């Protein structure tokens, strides 16, 4: 049983945009929110001042922009591609996140995580073949 | 609420949300294939002609977003995805990311089942194998999630700050 894929090139391009947009969005948002600081008050005036900091933080704005681009790409690709391909293929973001964590955040990647990343890669290959 | 029912609801919400979004977008694509303003009705006609009244060339480009946001399946999918996001944040406040991530990755399996039932998608044996491999992979990636010293992360963030 071979499932033919319409517009394969566009599909892979848009999945790449979803994966990278989502990952960059995650990284930028978490960086921005850490710059703003923990929300530990219920005082209205303090909350308003935090909200002002959040919506003017350049990392938060770019993070939201990345996520918006990823979401619109998802909507576009779903108009022709099967969801049973697109949804698991977005798990490729774990691979991007692992590489990002290693080189951008200097996290140590242990063996289990490396094997997991390789499994996700292999799984995505099986999806699209 | 206990953790397990919350996880089950979250997995169902995101899978159903994906399925409804897909259903909606496929319907929009079908409608766009032979879109004709004179045959449009109701709010679609009103909104597209409003865009067209600014510039007639924009009408055809305006049809896509208008058809999307007025599609009931799309709105249902969007609502479910929003609900999932709130549930995901709730889960994160109660459990470790290294626990929440692998359990929500089971949604890939449920999404494939729903795609077969609701969208009549054909899921080949090879694709099932890929989905299972990805679930195992996520399970192993998430196991080592919280091992990095928090101080390393903090110093990186303050570097980005300056």
Image (cartoon, coloured by chain):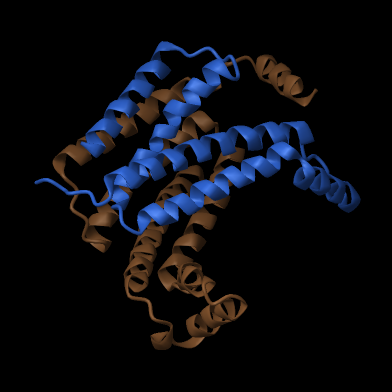
Chain colours: A blue, B brown
**Nearest to the observer: residue A23 or residue B101:** A23
Q: Is residue B65 left or right of residue A31?
A: left
- In the current view of this chain or complex, which residue is farthest to the right? A45
Instruction: Give residue A118's quadrant in the image.
Output: top left
Coordinates of residue B52 in the picture (x, y in percent) = 55, 78
Q: Is residue B97 left or right of residue B77?
A: right
Q: Residue at x 38, y 66 (%)?
A: B24
Q: Position of residue A39 (x, y in %)?
A: 77, 40
Q: Quadrant of the C terminus of chain A?
A: top left
Q: Does A16 sit above or below residue B121?
A: above
- Please name the residue shown 61% across and 46% down the image: A65
Q: Is residue B112 left or right of residue A22?
A: left
Say which residue appears at 46% left-offset and 43% top-offset. A18
Q: In this picture, is B93 found above or below A99?
A: below
Could you say where residue A14 lies in the image, as x and y percent from the top left?
40, 45
Q: Is residue B148 visible?
A: yes
Q: Position of residue A74 (x, y in %)?
A: 43, 51
Q: Kindly give the residue lying farthest to the left in the view shown.
A: A1
Asked whether residue B13 is in view, the answer is no
Q: Disc count in the image?
A: 0
Q: Give the residue displayed 49% in from the left and 80% down from the top.
A: B44
User: In the image shown, does A8 or B17 lie closer to the viewer?
Assistant: A8
């Amino acid at each position: 049983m071979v499932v033919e894929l319409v517009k394969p090139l566009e599909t892979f391009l848009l999945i790449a945009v979803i994966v990278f947009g989502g990952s960059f969005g995650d990284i930028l948002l978490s960086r921005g929110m850490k710059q703003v600081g923990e929300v530990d008050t219920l005082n209205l005036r303090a909350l308003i001042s935090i909200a002002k900091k959040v919506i003017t933080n350049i990392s938060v704005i770019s993070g939201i922009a990345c996520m918006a681009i990823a979401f619109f790409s998802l909507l576009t690709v779903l108009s022709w591609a099967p969801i049973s391909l697109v949804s698991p293929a977005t798990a490729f973001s774990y691979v991007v996140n692992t590489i990002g964590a290693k080189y951008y955040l200097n996290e140590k990647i242990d063996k289990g995580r490396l094997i997991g990343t390789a499994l996700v890669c292999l799984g995505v290959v099986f999806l699209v073949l | 609420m206990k953790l397990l029912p919350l996880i089950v609801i979250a997995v169902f919400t995101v899978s159903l949300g994906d399925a409804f979004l897909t259903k909606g977008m496929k319907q929009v694509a079908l409608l766009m294939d032979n879109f004709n303003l004179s045959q449009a009705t109701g709010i679609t006609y009103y909104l597209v002609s409003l865009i067209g009244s600014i510039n007639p060339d924009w009408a055809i480009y305006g049809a896509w977003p208008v058809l999307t946001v007025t599609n009931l399946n799309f709105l249902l999918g969007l609502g479910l995805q929003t609900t999932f996001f709130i549930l995901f944040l709730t889960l994160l406040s109660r459990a470790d990311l290294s626990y929440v991530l692998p359990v929500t990755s089971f949604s890939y399996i449920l999404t494939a089942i729903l795609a077969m039932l609701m969208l009549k998608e054909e899921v080949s044996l090879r694709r099932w194998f890929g989905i299972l491999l990805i679930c195992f992979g996520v399970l192993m990636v998430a196991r080592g999630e919280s091992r990095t010293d928090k101080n390393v992360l903090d110093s990186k963030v303050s570097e980005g700050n300056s």
